[in-house]
Amino acid sequence: MRLPRAAVPLLLLLASCAEAPPPREFDGAAAFGYIEQQLAFGPRIPGSAGHARMKGWLDSLARARADTVILQDWEHVTAKGARLQLRNVIARFNPGASERVLFLAHWDTRPRADAPASRDSTAPVPGANDGASGVALLLGVADALRKQPPAIGVDLLFVDGEDFGHFEDSTETLVGSRYYAAHQAPGNTPLYAILFDMVGDRDLQLYKEGNSLLGAPEVVDRVWSTARDVGHGASFIDGPKHTLTDDHVPLQRVGIRAIDVIDFDYPHWHTPDDTIDKVSAQSLQVVGDVAMAVIRRAGAK
Ligand SMILES: [Zn+2]
C-alpha cells in the first residue's frame, strides 16, 4: 500500500479554506467483497462449475445496476479443438448518450498456474488479482453510477476467455476482447477505452504501459494526470515500464483509443498464490477513485 501521506495535510488545509473535496464515490471495501465472492466460486475457467456460477452472478449484478445489459454469447473453438461456451457482459449506463467511454476487465481465470515462478504448474490460478480485481473495480464503478448516473455514456465490458492458454496462440487468449472488437455496433465507437487488469495488488505500482503509450498516449495522460490531481500520484507512477499484450490491443486494432491500467510487478502472477491476501481494499480504492474522477470530469466538459 502506498498512500500519498505527505499530501494529506495539504489537502486538509486546502479543504478548510476552499470548497470541500467531493465525497468519495467508490467504495473500496465493497469492491474487495466482490473479489472475495468471486474466489468463493472457485477458478472461473471456461467450461468449469466456477465459470458457470460466476456467469450467473455477474449477469444478475449487472442487471441490478445498469440501464441496459447486453450479452454476447458464443461458442469458441481453439486451435487445439477445445470448445468453449463464452460470454461477454456489457453493462450500459446512459445508453442514449452519443459520447461514451468504455471500461473493461476480464472475468475468466487461467486454467494452469504455469508462470516460471510457479510452485505447481498443474494447479489453476485463483485469480484474486488476475481476473477478480478488474471485475471488482468495474462493479464498484457500477455501484457509484447507479447512485449518481453519469453525464456521458459509460459502458462496462466484462470480457471472457482472456487467459485460457498461450499468448502466442490467438485462439486461446484475448478471445472475448477480439470478439467484442469484431462485433461492435456501427457508430458505437467510444471516445476511449480503459482496461483494468491486476489492479488489486497490496503493493500498488501502476506504470504507464508501452502499447497504451504507442496507441493512445493522450488517454494515458488523461488518466495519470487525473490520478495526480486526486492525490494518487504515488500509485500512478509517471513513467513507462512494461509493454504487454492484453485486452486493449484487439480494441486498438479496430480504432478504439484503448489503454491498459495494470500493475505487472506482481510476483504471484500465473501462480497458485494469486490469492486474497495479496490484494487490498485500499488499492481498489485508489484505482476506483481515479476511474470515477475520469468519468465525472468527462461529463463536466
Ligand atoms: Zn493472466
Image (cartoon, helix red, strand yellow):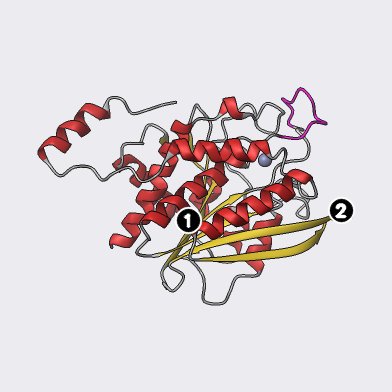
* Between 185 and 223, the one nearer to me in the picture: 185
Looking at the image, is mark 1 or mark 2 nearer the viewer? Answer: 2
Circle 1 residue: 216
**Quadrant for the C terminus in the image:** bottom left
In the picture, measured across the screen, residue 194 lies left or right of residue 224, that is right
Relative to 144, say whether 232 is above or below: above
Task: Determine if the magenta segment contains residue 116.
Answer: yes
- Asked whether residue 258 appears in the rendered view, the answer is yes
Relative to 112, say whether 103 is above or below: below
Dominant secondary-structure state across the stretch colored magenta? loop
Measured as percent of width and height from the top left, residue 289 is found at 38, 43
Residue lying at the far bottom of the rendered structure = 186
Residues drawn in magenta: 115-125
Instruction: Give the residue type that dot 1 points to.
Output: Ala
* Residue at x-position 31% and y-position 25%: 5
Residue lying at the far right of the rendered structure = 81
Instruction: Give the residue type that dot 2 points to.
Output: Ala
Measured as percent of width and height from the top left, residue 81 is found at 89, 55
Circle 2 residue: 82
* Residue at x-position 57% and y-position 38%: 35
* Residue at x-position 63% and y-position 50%: 57
Task: Determine if the magenta segment contains residue 63.
Answer: no
Disc 1 or 2, which lies upstream in sequence?
2
Measured as percent of width and height from the top left, residue 15 is found at 17, 37
Ligand 1's quadrant:
top right
